Amino acid sequence: MTKELKLFATDMDGTFLRSDRAYNRDKLATVLEQFDQLGWIFCASSGRQLLALEELFDGFTDKMAFVAENGGVVSYKNQMISAQTFSTSQIDSIIDLLRRMPLSPDGDFLISGLKGAYSIKGVSDWFFDKAQLYYANCQIVNSLDEIDDTLLKVTTNFPEDKTRECESFITEELPYVRATTTGFTSIDIIPDGISKASGLNALVKHFGWTADNLAAFGDQMNDYEMLEYAGTSYAVSNATKEILTLADNIIGSNDEDAVFTEIERIISGK
């Protein structure tokens, strides 16, 4: 029996976005119009910062919800619902650990905030250039003291075959953090207890709904808790093995606009 779905949350990279990091704007406009009539909500649930997601969905932000920073920031129709933050001293400790740990990324890390994203002088060109594909208002600063922002997350890279090992090491070393693999070589370091599931739970409670009203779409391990929490879960066919095993349903790939296809099927009642 189909649950009464009202909230549709989808991961971005590898799930909703095609490999060229684009999506069909005309289709989204149609879906959002239909959702408005049905009283449903479309939510972008991503490891990306809120600022970058708002740029990605320019023209649509007043019609949708966002769970950004892997659950650390939640907003709806341009209104903030919750934001989980790090103190400057906590960020400093995270950076210290990254610099001295085995397989250290050295200076290749990014600190994400509400107003921008920041690397410290010494970051490599390739890392900073890549960060600008996913983060808005990227800046290089001399030290943490120069950052005037609400600090939310640290993201970095490790060798692909070592990401899970490094994820566990960071989480075990710092009791106030949770490190999560976001795909291939990337790891996000977020406040302990935060996940896309916790962010969506805040959104669900905001509307007086339950997890049974949530449909979630994902492809990577930072989607695991979200798919586990959702009343109905979907994995795109290009998802990791663990996500394919977990999901209630497997749909087409991100390059086939599979999320749109499934949402359109649900709207039609087929």
Image: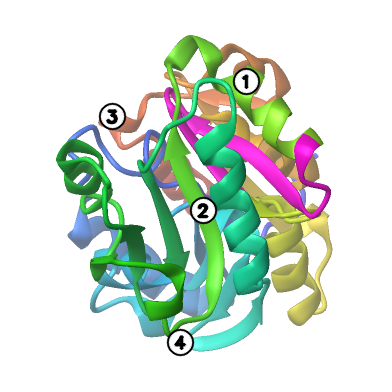
Tell me how far mark 4 sits from mark 1, CA to CA.
35 Å
- Which of the two discs, 3 and 1, labels the residue nearer the N terminus? 1
Classify 215 as above or below 85: above
Mark 3 or mark 1, whichever is nearer to me:
1
Q: Nearer the viewer, mark 2 or mark 3?
A: 2
* Cα gap from disc 2 to disc 4, whole angstroms: 24 Å
**In this view, 246 is above or below 85:** above
Give the residue pinned by disc 2: 154
Amino acid type, label 1: Arg
Q: Where the C terminus falls, by quadrant?
A: top right
Q: Residue at x 24, y 74 (%)?
A: 58
Look at discs 4 and 1 and give the one toward the viewer: 1
Of marks 4 and 3, the one in the foreground: 4
Amino acid at dot 2: Val
* Residue linked to disc 3: 256
- Give the residue number, with chain letter if any, for mark 1: 164
Can you say whether 57 is above or below 175 in the image? below
> Which badge, 2 or 3, is on the more N-terminal residue?
2
In what quadrant of the picture does the N terminus appear?
top right
In this picture, is 29 found above or below 229? Answer: below
Please identify the quarter of the rendering in which residue 148 is found.
Answer: bottom left
Earlier residue among tags 4 and 1: 4
Distance between the alpha carbons at the discs numbered 1 and 2: 16 Å
Q: How many marks?
A: 4
Q: Please report the bounds of the magenta region as a residue range.
A: 173-189
- Residue 68 in sight: no
In the rendered structure, which amino acid carries the disc numbered 3?
Answer: Glu
